């Protein structure tokens, strides 16, 4: 069995006084947040920022104080996967999707994002991020 680690960012921004978030739909149909594998000697934050840039062309600023992880098993690949997620703020919401991995990018309200995300563990993690972002 293999162990894999990915890191990503939940990219938030304010629009008309309300928090909005950018989520992605991967080519395999999974809806969540930009993330990807740790490469070489990268830190978790470096990986998260690189992956967001590669997948969306967004450049968030990671907000200190939020680091959550989820782990799950992928039987078809015999992989234990750990995903580390940070909260980030973005100023410029001009995005470009990485066609090789991303089929769509959505700008959503919090409620819309919760409806679109298709895994419960990702929704739970997102709810923790919402509480965090509402307290900063």
Image (cartoon, rainbow, N blue to C red):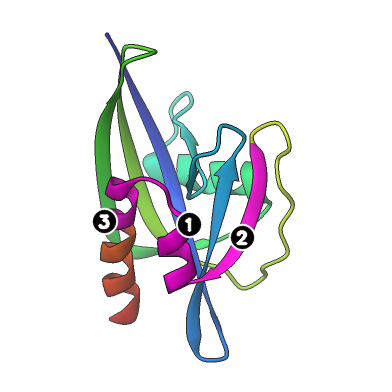
> Is residue 61 shown above or below 32?
below
How packed mark 2 is, by other alpha carbons closer than 10 Å (few <14, some 14-19, many 20 or more), is some
Q: Is mark 1 on a helix, strand or loop?
A: helix
Q: Is mark 3 on a helix, strand or loop?
A: helix
Residue shown at 33% from the left, 43% from the top = 84
User: What label sits on residue 80 in the rendered view?
Assistant: none
Residue lying at the far bottom of the rendered structure: 17
Please name whichever residue, 61 or 86, is drawn nearer the observer in this view of the structure. Answer: 86
Residue shown at 70% from the left, 31% from the top = 100
- Residue to which mark 1 is pinned: 116
- Residue to which mark 3 is pinned: 124
Q: Position of residue 74 (x, y in %)?
A: 33, 21
Q: Where is residue 109 in the image (x, y as percent from the top left)?
A: 50, 74
Q: Can residue 62 be seen in this view?
A: no
Q: How far apart are marks 2 and 3 (CA)?
A: 19 Å
Q: Position of residue 88 (x, y in %)?
A: 46, 63
Disc on the earlier residue, 3 or 1: 1
Say if mark 2 contacts mark 1, CB within 8 Å: yes
- Residue to which mark 2 is pinned: 106
The part of the chain drawn in magenta is 102-125
Q: In this rendering, would 42 be left or right of 57?
A: left
């Amino acid at each position: 069995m293999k162990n894999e680690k990915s890191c990503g960012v939940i990219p938030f921004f304010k629009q008309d006084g309300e928090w909005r978030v950018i989520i992605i739909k991967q080519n395999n149909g999974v809806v969540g947040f930009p993330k990807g594998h740790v490469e070489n000697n990268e830190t978790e934050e470096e990986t998260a920022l690189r992956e967001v840039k590669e997948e969306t062309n967004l450049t968030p600023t990671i907000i200190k104080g939020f680091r959550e992880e989820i782990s799950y098993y992928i039987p078809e690949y015999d992989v234990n996967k750990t995903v580390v997620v940070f909260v980030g703020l973005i100023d410029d919401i001009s995005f470009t999707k990485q066609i090789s991995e991303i089929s769509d990018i959505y700008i959503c309200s919090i409620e819309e994002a919760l409806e679109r995300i298709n895994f419960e563990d990702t929704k739970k993690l997102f709810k923790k991020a919402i509480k965090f972002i509402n307290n900063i």
